[in-house]
Amino acid sequence: MAKITFITKDGEKVTVEGDSGNVMQLAVNNGVEGIDGDCGGVCSCATCHVFVAENDMDKVGEAGEIEADMLELEDNVSDFSRLCCQIEVSEAIDGIELTVAKED
Ligand code: FES
């Protein structure tokens, strides 16, 4: 079981729990605002862009090659950017904090 906290555009903290699937699915299932997951999690829409808290980067790891290419198309990318459909939910990421990157 992993607890994941999202910080939405409004600054609201939403903590959700899951034990399988990917982080985007978990967010969508729990109605986290700003995570749309339009492509269904196949790394081709970037509507699941999040910024990983700096301290949590070790747990989450860096973007893979295809994911990094997709992120390059985004305007507001940082060193902490990930597409959260590419992050598997597992105990390894318990307690991480993700800021929703969606622009208005
Ligand atoms: S849901 Fe489309 S890239 Fe993550």
Image (tube, grey):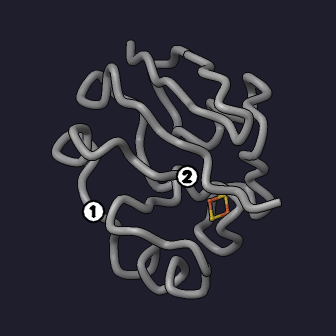
Can you name the residue that lies furthest to the left here?
58
Vertical relation: 100 (above or below) 102:
above
In this rendering, the answer to whether 32 lies above or below 104 is above
Amino acid carrying mark 2 in the image: Cys
Residue ID at (83%, 60%):
104
Report the residue marked by disc 1: 62
Q: Nearer the viewer, residue 82 or 91?
A: 82
Residue found at x 53% / y 52%: 50
Residue 88: image quadrant is top left
* Residue 75 location (% of width, % of height): 61, 80
Location of residue 15 in the rendering, given as x and y in whole percent from the top left corner? 56, 16
Q: Depth-wise, is mark 1 or mark 2 nearer the camera? A: 1
Task: Say above or below: 79 vs 20.
Answer: below
- The amino acid on which the numbered mark 1 sits, given as a three-letter code, is Glu
Graded by Cα atoms within 10 Å as few (under 14), some (14 to 19) or many (20 or more), the crowding at tag 1 reads some
**Ligand 1: which quarter?**
bottom right
Q: Position of residue 12 (x, y in %)?
A: 67, 24
Q: How far apart in space, not on screen, are marks 1 and 2 (Cα)?
A: 13 Å
